[in-house]
Amino acid sequence: QVQLVESGGGSVQVGGSLTLSCAASGYTISTYSMAWFRQALGKEREGVATIGFGGTANYADSVTGRFTISKDNAKNTLYLQMNSLKPEDTAMYYCAASAEARWYVPLSPRLFTYWGQGTQVAVSS
């Protein structure tokens, strides 16, 4: 049974930083593609960043240059380093895992089979 457990969310001021983690079990992250999505209150879920099985990253325009997705295969954990946070980054952040091994991964939620419960990020001015 695949489980994805996010952690690291919280409240931060504008310009601050947070690092989200997603610990996977029943799933080998080195083999497949993974991603971070977010959903703000009253809005649709949007892709933030994806990472292919080989480490190729893809980012939404809104976070490029501020966020970094990475993974530690030995720890079977996915990360999202978020810097220069803005109020518009406030959302529930979800870790997602694919059943496919893609080198380059589009920011499409339909490519991902497994989802975590989410971790809340709140950015205040």
Image (cartoon, helix red, strand yellow):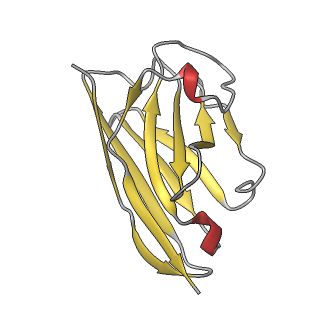
Point 66% across, 25% down: residue:
105
The quarter of the image holding the N terminus is: top left
Residue lying at the far right of the rendered structure: 61
Q: Position of residue 20 (x, y in %)?
A: 43, 56
Judged left or right of residue 11, residue 117 is left
Q: Nearer the viewer, residue 55 or 40?
A: 40
Q: Indicate whether 21 appears above or below 99.
A: below
Point 35% across, 21% down: residue:
28
Number of marks drawn:
0
Q: Indicate whether 36 appears above or below 62.
A: above
Q: Position of residue 77 (x, y in %)?
A: 37, 39
Q: Indicate whether 14 appears above or below 23.
A: below
Q: Position of residue 81 (x, y in %)?
A: 53, 58
Judged left or right of residue 62, residue 88 is left
Q: Indicate whether 102 appears above or below 62.
A: above
Point 56% across, 78% down: residue:
16
- Does any portion of residue 85 appear in the rendered image? no
Q: Nearer the viewer, residue 114 or 77?
A: 114
Point 60% across, 64% down: residue:
89
Q: Nearer the viewer, residue 99 or 110?
A: 110
Q: Indicate the quadrant where residue 94 lies.
A: top left
Q: Indicate the quadrant where residue 42 lies.
A: bottom right
